Image (cartoon, rainbow, N blue to C red):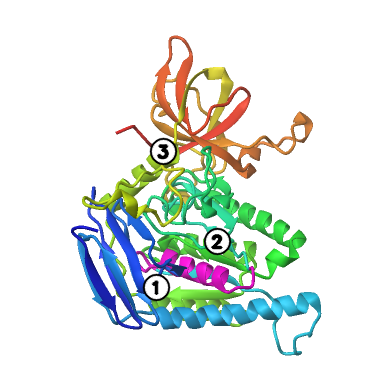
Amino acid sequence: MSHSKEWVLEPETEYRFELDPGNSLAIKLVRGHAEIFGAELAEGKTYLFAYECKAAVFTYQGCTIEMSTASTEYVSEETPMYPYANVHLALEKMRVRAQRAQHGSPAPGPDEDAEPPRVLVLGPENAGKTTVCKILVNYAVRAGQDWAPVYVNVDPGEGGWTVPGSISATSVSAPLTTASPANPLGSAATSAPSTLTSNALLPLVYWYGHAETKRNPLLMDRLIRNLGENVNERHDVDLEGRVAGLIVDTPSSFASSSSTSNADHRHMLIKACVDAFRINVILVLGHEKLNVEMQRTYGNRMTVVKIPKSGGVVELDAHYRHRIHTQQLHTYMYGQPIHPPPGLPASANATAGGESALEAHLSPSSSVISFSDLTIYRIGEQSMAPSSALPIGATRTVSEMQPVQVDPAAPGSGLLNAVLALLAPPQHPDEAERYDEEVLDLQVAGFLAVTNIDVARKRMTVLSPSPGSFAGRTAIMGSFEWTEQ
């Protein structure tokens, strides 16, 4: 690589980098062994990073890496990787015991718990929760036991495999790559043909529709329990998959208690996760007070462990998160081509995360549909104050959980530029078995963006990753909007 340099990393150190908007970075492992968030780098392969990516290359035994210049870069000798590796080893013992118990050979001792690890990761904002989850999942996948742990993302501000505003879960059988914050957990299957190993991921998705859990905690509670029910149903029939366990990534709001009402919502949603996913291990990331709280509440019936926060965690502001949300929505529709840095030869065969570049460009479909083709709901009122803020004795005319149908022709409908979650068909097509809030319990089949509304002709234009008919379909809008740049 021209304009490149080599870094020689000593054992147990990591090279950390941050990219500015519009910059990209190429990294090649020249010799030795290294990993990025638990995913091993292949020697001689060139990995691309872009879209304000912030990551680290760690080595246990030492290595030499070659790269172009990053916006911010440095090497750190103080890393929390050994504590994280120790957590992985403890979880691995639980998997092995659960597998032995399942096969009955040999049976665990009377004092040994034979349950697989079901881990809840908690921590404040900018603590590195998603990084820890990726490391633990990637280490499990690399353990050589054919584990395929379930990664659950209940942080609607992150988006996971789809778009922000959703919560999701999927079984992971190949290392999760890192190339861009717009795909924090790797790429899921899309409409494009692809050979990406991570594209075997087919996440189960529910639509919350907002970035903050405090916007509608009752809805969040219900969706978490829906997600948990689906994961448990799968594990009840897939016993081999069950022993790999699951890792639950949570939003920072689960760790903050700035007000009494927020604390109530926080405890309610933590309990929803514990119940829904049958949690038996809680990891608290760098937060002494939260660790004491969790020990007091759950320490008598499960393991609660405080683990250190990495010194490499970057403070992310609201403007950065907004840019990433916009990029995630654009990536969902158009794919995510990463342009190599200047001077990188074509022969380098550099790709995002070292994966195939087949899905870099997608061709979304723009369709003009009738207002009557799509039934659109909003959950609760558009702007809803918490119940505690209502006047004494006052009651709501619309509850937080009530689906309210949206009229596209009505002034102020908010549909223009809205992101819509297209729902899977109802499980009970028979009208006699329908119930008022059924749309809350339907999984997401895909996402649309409303790009134009023609009230006079009662038509609207929607953008979707793939063509298809929307006649008779149901969609839900949230508070996310997207316009093409």
Q: Residue at x 76, y 79 (%)?
A: 101
Local packing at callout 1 (Cα closer than 10 Å; few below 14, some 14-19, many 20+) is many
Of labels 1 and 2, earlier in sequence is: 1
How many labels sit on residues?
A: 3
Q: Position of residue 331 (x, y in %)?
A: 40, 42
Pick whichever, 484 or 382, lies toward us. Answer: 484
Q: Amino acid at mark 3?
A: His
Q: CA distance from mark 3 to mark 1?
A: 29 Å
- Along the viewing direction, whichever of 52 and 341 lies nearer the viewer: 341
Q: Decide: marks 1, 2 in contact (CB < 8 A)? A: no
Residue 35 location in percent, x, y?
A: 41, 70
Q: From the viewer's perspective, is residue 101 above or below residue 180? A: below
Magenta region: 124-146
| Left or right: 160 in relation to 259 | right
The outermost residue toward the left is 3
Q: Which residue is mark 3?
A: 361
Amino acid residing under circle 1: Ala
In the drawing, what numbered circle is on residue 34?
A: 1
Instruction: Using the rendered view, name the quadrant where residue 129 is placed.
Output: bottom left
Check residue 9 in the rendering and tell me which mark sits there, or answer none.
none
Could you say which is closer to the camera, residue 83 or residue 13? 13
